[in-house]
Amino acid sequence: MSSGPRQAPRSGWWADRTDRTDLLGWLGLAGAGLAASWLASQTQLRVGTASPPFSGSYLLRVGPPSLLAPAVAAVVLVAAARSVTDRWPWRMVLLGSYLAATAWALALALADGRAGLAAPVNAPEEYLADLDRVNGGPLRYLQDFVADGASLTVATRSHPPLPLLLLWLLERVGVRSPLALGVVLTMVASLTVPAVLVAVRSLCGGAAARQLAPVLALAPYAVWVAVSMDGVTAALAAGSVTAAVIGSEHGRRWWVSLTGASVAGLLLGVAALFSYSVAWLAVSVMCVYFVRRRPLLNVVTAAFALLPLALAELAGFSWPAGLAAAQRDVVTRIAPHRSALLWGLLGLAVLVLACGPALVRSARRVRATPGWPFLVGAAAGVAFAVLAGLARSDVERSWLPFFPWLLVASVAPVRPAGEPPPAPIWLIAAGALTGVVIQAVLVSPW
């Protein structure tokens, strides 16, 4: 596949009728979700938070640092409107999208000053408070993880053990201050964007990937990508899906296909040791192999996905036992205060707000996109969380691995390598504005 630029239709500054319809549809959904959240907070329903549909509290905070994010958004929007990525080499598109996504996430966090990057890492119920648990060594920590769950912070006990081990490793190599940790986590999490673009280029065509770059770079959910261990999980999961897509391309040598499938499995297994819910993206991998007619690669990916879990089991941590313990924690800590039915609806409101107006356009095109395997796995993860009553626990973070894949169809062509629709500039701008507003009014507990 050539890495040279592909021409896509210029979008210009003015929204066409389709974009206006999608924007109005999103405004209706977002308004309905916020109205339902307000009504729930005014009644005797079990809401369990001061800021439905999000976790945290509402407090308007505006100052000079609040101008950083709009400035970053303006630069990216101008570049997108001028179709800059159509003229760039593919590697520059990947680098530019990564830098834009990183700058966007950091700028949103810096609206609260340096504390925006340091405070979430150093919060009382976050991983860093448990760092001394690893002083006895990683093996001892893994062996006692499930048994000591009740005494761990909320973040640690609701996830597998690798997030805390990552912080321990970073401390060992000299990254110790909360500010430095916040920057490193954000930079790693932003790798999700180029990884998704590589996968989309392979399955949907290069022009579609170029058009998708600003959609992902300025996504509203970057509010939670910044300083987020779930953002790191999203990057690992995106790498897994991308490795599967690249390895299953027709014409690849057999050893390249096996390597891609193996890397996909390893990354998925490691991601599952960061988050229990991310395993649903295995559905996307299976669908990719189905589309590419490479069923035997499922065996390779599955075997290598189980390898990290098996090694963790040998070291003393049982993934199924950890999942069961996390589920019990949700039942005892959250269920009495948050209605499963109510938060299933509020979780969908979070989805609409976090993904922005591009989600509506993506939903409208989902039946005619070669990128449907990406959406199937992500949608399955969201649907299961809603139906199983798991959407009442901080979905704005736990669904981060799913959000970018749900936006793929917003620019996907009808056939692979076909002509994509124009980049939805006004939808991207409205999404960026949503991120700025959420950052300004929401104080998250992490």
Image (cartoon, rainbow, N blue to C red):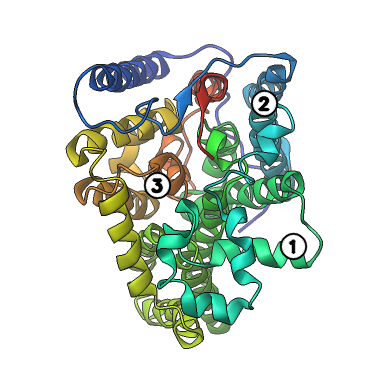
Q: What amino acid type is highlighted by mark number 1?
A: Glu
Residue drawn at x 50%, y 62% is 274
**Residue furthest out toward the bottom:** 314
Residue drawn at x 37%, y 19% is 18
Relative to 12, does residue 401 appear above or below in the rendering? below
The earlier-in-sequence mark between 3 and 2 is: 2
* Quadrant location of the C terminus in the rendered image: top right
- The residue that mark 1 highlights is 171
Find numbered disc 2 in the image and state the secondary structure of the residue it sits on. helix
Q: What amino acid type is highlighted by mark number 2?
A: Asp
- Spot occupied by residue 86 in the image (x, y as percentages of width and height): 66, 36
Relative to 434, does residue 297 appear above or below in the rendering? below
Task: Please say whether residue 201 is visible from this viewpoint.
Answer: no
Q: Nearer the viewer, residue 40 or 154?
A: 154
Closer to us: mark 3 or mark 2? 2
- The residue that mark 2 highlights is 112
The earlier-in-sequence mark between 1 and 2 is: 2
In this image, 419 relative to 79: left or right? left
Task: Please say whether residue 263 is visible from this viewpoint.
Answer: yes
Q: Tell me whether circle 1 and circle 3 mark residues in contact (CB < 8 Å).
A: no
In this image, 12 relative to 385: left or right? right
CA–CA distance between discs 3 and 2?
44 Å
Find numbered disc 1 in the image and state the secondary structure of the residue it sits on. helix
Q: What amino acid type is highlighted by mark number 3?
A: Arg
- Spot occupied by residue 422 in the image (x, y as percentages of width and height): 50, 28
Q: Tell me whether circle 1 and circle 2 mark residues in contact (CB < 8 Å).
A: no
- The residue that mark 3 highlights is 415
Find numbered disc 3 in the image and state the secondary structure of the residue it sits on. loop
Relative to 373, does residue 103 appear above or below in the rendering? above
The earlier-in-sequence mark between 1 and 3 is: 1
Q: Nearer the viewer, residue 207 or 195?
A: 195
